[in-house]
Image: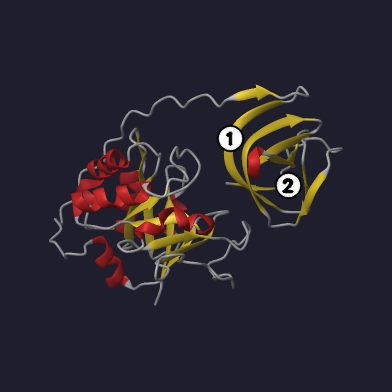
């Protein structure tokens, strides 16, 4: 029988951990080398009190991978062996996105420190970036039918495992909460967490100590050639209706395509002008596409953001 799980971070409500459908909880522990989730210990303890399987993940910042691995393990060393470990490999706030060597160096260092191979969370389209980990790690793929799939029933869709022999896990929703399914049983989960079956102390581990959180860098802003101000921001927008994708951020700009409801667009900047909030979509050869995502007057969104 598969294991259904949720993954949580500092802004997640405890109700997500308490959801009776979730048999396991994977908690964000660290990011880069300067952030510890201040709710990590609480979320870990709550999941344990509810009798759920547990895990911890590190969000890659793209700095030195060995240093990030050491930072991760140093902050969760008292939990090693009690839950699975995972690397969250995403584009946002990741300076090494696109580097196919980074994840392998990270997991090798984690294994050197703990004897545990972490699983790797990655979107399906970026499986190639972590393919060289397939000989030692499991893969946890993110792919959604839509951002409005507010259900624990699995959507009927194919999900690739790329170079990996099989899917270890699949994150199949990301709207109201991140729902996951892992294709293993409780014994398999515990084997990933503690492959050498080392004795784990029963006493409560000490809490990770949050490191000082540096002041976030102010987003870069600029004014384009037609006088519109843009602000740098990376994310994914999923449309909830048909929206035109254009070569410029004007309603008069020439059309690239009409996106159907449920289309996902990766964007790197936004601008509020001419009655709308516009997003900029990076495309090949240094070109960009543009689309509206929100009514600037009513603030009504035309989709969801992640």
Check disc 1 and report its element: helix, strand or loop: strand
The residue positioned 37% from the left and 36% from the top of the image is 63
- Residue 301 image label: none
Q: Horizontal and vertical percent for residue 65? A: 32, 42
Comes first in the chain, label 2 or label 1:
1
59 above or below 35? below
Q: Residue furthest front?
A: 285
Nearest the viewer among 219 and 64 is 64
Nearest the viewer among 43 and 233 is 233
- Residue 302 image label: 2
The residue positioned 29% from the left and 71% from the top of the image is 188
- Residue 233 image label: 1
Q: Look at the image and tell me whether residue 283 can be seen.
A: no
Check disc 2 and report its element: helix, strand or loop: loop
How far is disc 2 from disc 1 in space, using C-alphas?
18 Å
The residue positioned 15% from the left and 52% from the top of the image is 203
Mark 1 is surrounded, within 10 Å at the Cα level, by few (under 14), some (14 to 19) or many (20 or more) other residues, namely some
Nearest the viewer among 37 and 168 is 168
Of labels 2 and 1, the one closer to you: 1
Q: Look at the image and tell me whether residue 155 can be seen.
A: yes
156 above or below 70? below
Q: Residue furthest bottom?
A: 1
User: In which quadrant of the rendered view does residue 1 lie?
Assistant: bottom left
Q: Is residue 112 left or right of residue 72?
A: left
The residue positioned 76% from the left and 34% from the top of the image is 296
Q: Horizontal and vertical percent for residue 267? A: 63, 42
């Amino acid at each position: 029988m598969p294991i259904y799980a949720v993954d949580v971070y500092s802004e997640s409500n405890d109700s997500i951990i308490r959801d009776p459908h979730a048999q396991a909880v994977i908690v964000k522990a660290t990011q880069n080398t300067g952030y510890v989730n201040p709710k990590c210990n609480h979320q870990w303890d709550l999941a344990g009190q509810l009798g759920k399987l547990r895990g911890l993940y590190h969000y890659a910042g793209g700095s030195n991978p060995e240093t990030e691995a050491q930072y991760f393990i140093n902050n969760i060393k008292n939990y090693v062996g009690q839950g699975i470990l995972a690397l969250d490999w995403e584009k946002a706030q990741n300076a090494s996105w696109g580097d196919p060597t980074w994840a392998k160096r990270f997991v090798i260092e984690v294994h050197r420190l703990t004897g545990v191979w972490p699983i790797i969370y990655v979107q399906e389209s970026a499986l190639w970036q972590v393919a060289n980990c397939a000989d030692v790690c499991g893969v946890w793929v993110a792919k959604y039918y839509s951002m409005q799939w507010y259900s624990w029933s699995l959507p009927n869709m194919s999900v690739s495992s790329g170079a990996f022999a099989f899917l270890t896990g699949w994150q199949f929703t990301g709207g109201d909460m991140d729902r996951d399914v892992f294709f293993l049983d409780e014994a398999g989960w515990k084997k990933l967490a503690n492959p050498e079956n080392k004795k784990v102390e029963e006493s409560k581990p000490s809490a990770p100590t949050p490191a000082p959180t540096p002041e976030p860098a102010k987003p870069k802003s600029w004014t384009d050639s037609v006088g519109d101000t843009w602000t740098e921001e990376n994310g994914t927008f999923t449309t909830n209706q048909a929206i035109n994708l254009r070569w410029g951020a004007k309603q008069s700009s020439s059309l690239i395509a009409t996106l159907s409801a449920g289309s996902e667009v990766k964007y790197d900047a936004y601008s509020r002008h001419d009655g709308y909030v516009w997003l900029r979509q990076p495309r090949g050869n240094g070109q960009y596409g543009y689309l509206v995502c929100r009514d600037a007057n009513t603030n009504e969104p035309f989709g969801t953001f992640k």
